[in-house]
């Protein structure tokens, strides 16, 4: 199951830290000013997902990079068109004469129109930007445990929304059995995944058909979590949101303004409380959380905005 923590205080920008049960790495979504991170969280970050590079979503990247340099790790950064050169420019702004070669390697995945993703590498030294591959897919990142899909929203610039999907897992229940687990369990799960009951497996020095043990297995549906940052409140964006986040378990969605300020929201290509909630409801999202509010509001205003959101989401 995915878990997300908002790492920015009320008066700061927006940044979320995402973790997954029984998974060693963590993941950052947007990197505005956020003072509650610690060094270990930065160093344990495997990938960073950036919606767009307005200053309140990107200014904190320098702090992240500061604590990753020297880790000798490979860190992926996903973001909109132009993100590769923007990351390179941030690195070139500093003097690095005392760091060791291969102190870190950044892999940058730049999302373009038409589901094209260009992949670049930035290595310690001159920080030369090297294009290593290009592929077409609505999956921008994946590993053994999960994958991340995306859609490009309009915020008078490209703003990427991300959906994290945990992969389904095959579980085995041996509580009522006299046999113990072992290497045969992995072989049984593999046969189950391939729907091949005729595969032979050895249990306690006896041979069996895999299908004879399928009743011990079940599929645990993977959890899903979405992050939707700044976007204009118009039909084309809403169509894309409903398509990507349909039936998502949990979604954090930008609700920059309250309903009374919806004209201001439209003017600045943002969404507002009630409409963000209604789109989540239309997408049949199970749990929706409003985030990223205008600094024009005081804390009591934010509480009222959140109440508007949850009232609209519950219908």
Image: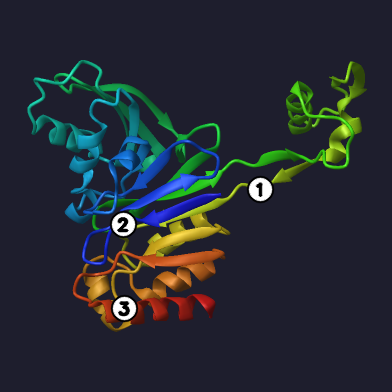
| Position in image of residue 69 (x %, y %) | 23, 29
Circle 3 residue: 258
- In which image quadrant can residue 187 be found? top right
Residue 154 disc label? 2
The kind of secondary structure element at disc 2 is: strand
- In which image quadrant can residue 49 be found? top left
The residue shown at (51%, 38%) is 23
Can you say whether 298 is above or below 98 in the image?
Answer: below
Q: Nearer the viewer, mark 1 or mark 2?
A: 1
Most foreground residue, 313 or 1: 1
The kind of secondary structure element at disc 1 is: loop
C-alpha distance separating marks 1 and 2: 32 Å
Residue 221 disc label? 1
| Position in image of residue 231 (x %, y %) | 32, 61
Nearest to N terminus: mark 1 or mark 2: 2
C-alpha distance separating marks 3 and 2: 20 Å
Most foreground residue, 310 or 2: 2
Nearest to N terminus: mark 3 or mark 2: 2
Q: Nearer the viewer, mark 3 or mark 2?
A: 3
Q: Nearer the viewer, mark 3 or mark 1?
A: 1
Left or right: where 196 falls relative to 208: left
The residue shown at (26%, 65%) is 269
């Amino acid at each position: 199951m995915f878990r997300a923590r908002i790492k920015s205080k009320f008066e700061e920008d927006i940044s979320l830290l995402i973790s997954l049960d029984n998974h060693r790495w963590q993941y950052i979504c947007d990197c505005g000013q956020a003072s509650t991170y610690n060094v270990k969280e930065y160093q344990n970050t495997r990938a960073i997902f950036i919606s767009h590079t307005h200053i309140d979503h990107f200014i904190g990247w320098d702090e992240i990079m500061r604590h990753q340099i020297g880790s000798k790790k490979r860190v992926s950064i996903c973001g909109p068109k132009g993100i590769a050169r923007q990351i390179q420019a941030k690195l070139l702004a500093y003097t690095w004469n005392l760091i060791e070669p291969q102190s870190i390697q950044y892999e940058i995945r730049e999302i373009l129109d038409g589901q094209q993703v260009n992949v670049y590498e930035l290595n310690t030294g001159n920080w030369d930007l090297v294009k290593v591959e290009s592929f077409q897919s609505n999956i921008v990142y994946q590993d053994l445990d999960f994958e991340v899909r995306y859609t490009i929203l309009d915020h008078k610039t490209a703003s990427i929304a991300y959906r994290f999907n945990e992969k389904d897992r095959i579980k085995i229940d041996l509580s009522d059995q006299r046999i113990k687990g072992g290497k045969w369990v992995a072989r049984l799960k593999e046969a189950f995944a391939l729907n091949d009951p005729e595969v032979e497996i050895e249990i306690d020095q006896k041979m069996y058909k895999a299908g004879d043990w399928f009743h011990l297995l079940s599929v645990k549906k993977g959890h899903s979590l979405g992050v939707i940052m700044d976007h204009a409140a118009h039909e084309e964006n809403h169509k894309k949101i409903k398509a990507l986040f349909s039936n998502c378990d949990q979604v954090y969605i930008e609700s920059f303004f309250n309903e009374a300020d919806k004209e201001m929201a439209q003017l600045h290509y943002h969404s507002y409380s009630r409409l963000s909630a209604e789109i989540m409801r239309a997408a049949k999202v199970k749990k929706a959380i409003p985030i990223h509010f205008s600094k024009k509001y005081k804390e009591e205003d934010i509480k009222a905005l959140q109440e508007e959101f949850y009232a609209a989401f519950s219908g």
